[in-house]
Amino acid sequence: MLVRVRLAALLGSAVLWFAPTAFAHVGVSSPGYAGQNQVLTFSIGHGCEGADTFRLEVTIPKEVTSLRAVPNVFGEAELKKDAAGVVTSVVWSKSNVRPADDQYYQLAIRIKVPDAPFTTVYFPAKQSCRAADGKETVVDWAALPVAGAEPTDEEGPPPAPALVVLPVRTTGWNKYTVKNKLTDLTVFADAQIVWSGDAAYSSNAATAALIENEEGVTKLTEIAAGAEIWVKY
Ligand SMILES: [Cu+2]
């Protein structure tokens, strides 16, 4: 515990470091916080081989039961619903197609984030582009990760936008019980430090070096189901 206090004191003066979220293609702002009303932004990194994007259809997973679309430069969204009135997809489209792919579009929805911490929710998206000569292209951002495989960036099928759900947090220390085993600790990329017993993790290189060099502290690489952890944001 002494060790923990000492490291914590060191962290007190550390500058918060936020991981830039990579939106290479079509992605969603992540993480979400369990049970919270939150605006999710879908970013369209680029069009289709030089052609402007004129339509995006986002499939809404069953876990999301409360949703509103945010109007944007595409206008107001069309909400597709099933027989029970549940929104199954959100469609934005615009009629003015630009002659070049030179815009960065952000399209947003406000949802109640599913109350399921440490899970990932997928929003498959269909991107449609139209070139100056009228040729249309559709890209399906729908691939789900394959267990054990490295996530690919430019190769492989286009990945579905993924929302990582984390427990509600406050600045400072947060105590959680992890329900499912966690092997990817990068969900804590913007935490200063994560403790589980005498093991610690940080995505910050300087803090990670402190962890490595501190006697009696081991490097936390995964978290067992049912473990209690302390996370400092
Ligand atoms: Cu891309």
Image: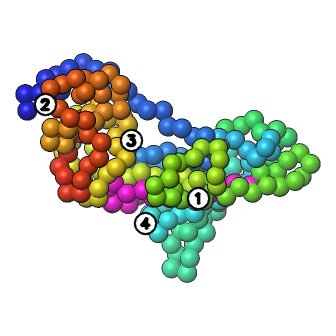
Would residue 29 appear left or right of 99 to someone viewing this image?
Answer: left
**Residue at the spot 17% in from the left edge and 49% down from the top edge:** 228
Q: CA distance from mark 2 to mark 3?
A: 23 Å
Sequence-earlier tag: 2 or 4? 4
The image quadrant where one finds the N terminus is top left
Ligand 1: image quarter = top right
Which disc number belongs to residue 63? Answer: 4
Magenta segment boundaries in residue numbering: 109-128
Label 3 C-beta lies within 8 Å of the nearest ligand 1 atom: no
Secondary structure of the residue carrying tag 1 is loop
Would residue 56 appear left or right of 226 to someone viewing this image?
Answer: right
Q: Position of residue 27 (x, y in %)?
A: 56, 47
**Residue at the spot 61% in from the left edge and 69% down from the top edge:** 80
Secondary structure of the residue carrying tag 4 is loop
Would residue 161 appear left or right of 172 to someone viewing this image?
Answer: right
Sequence-earlier tag: 1 or 2? 1
Q: CA distance from mark 1 to mark 2?
A: 42 Å
Sequence-earlier tag: 3 or 1? 1
Instruction: Report the residue that reaches farthest toward the bottom.
Output: 83
Residue type beneath disc 3: Thr
Q: Residues within 10 Å of mark 2 (few under 14, many from 20)?
A: few
Q: Position of residue 210 (x, y in %)?
A: 25, 23
Residue pointed to by mark 2: 216
Residue type beneath disc 4: Glu
- Answer with the quarter of the image where residue 100 lies: top right
Q: CA distance from mark 3 to mark 1?
A: 20 Å
Of discs 2 and 3, which sits in the foreground? 2
Residue pointed to by mark 3: 186
Q: Residues within 10 Å of mark 1 (few under 14, many from 20)?
A: some
Of discs 4 and 3, which sits in the foreground? 3
Residue nearest the observer in this picture, 58 or 144? 144
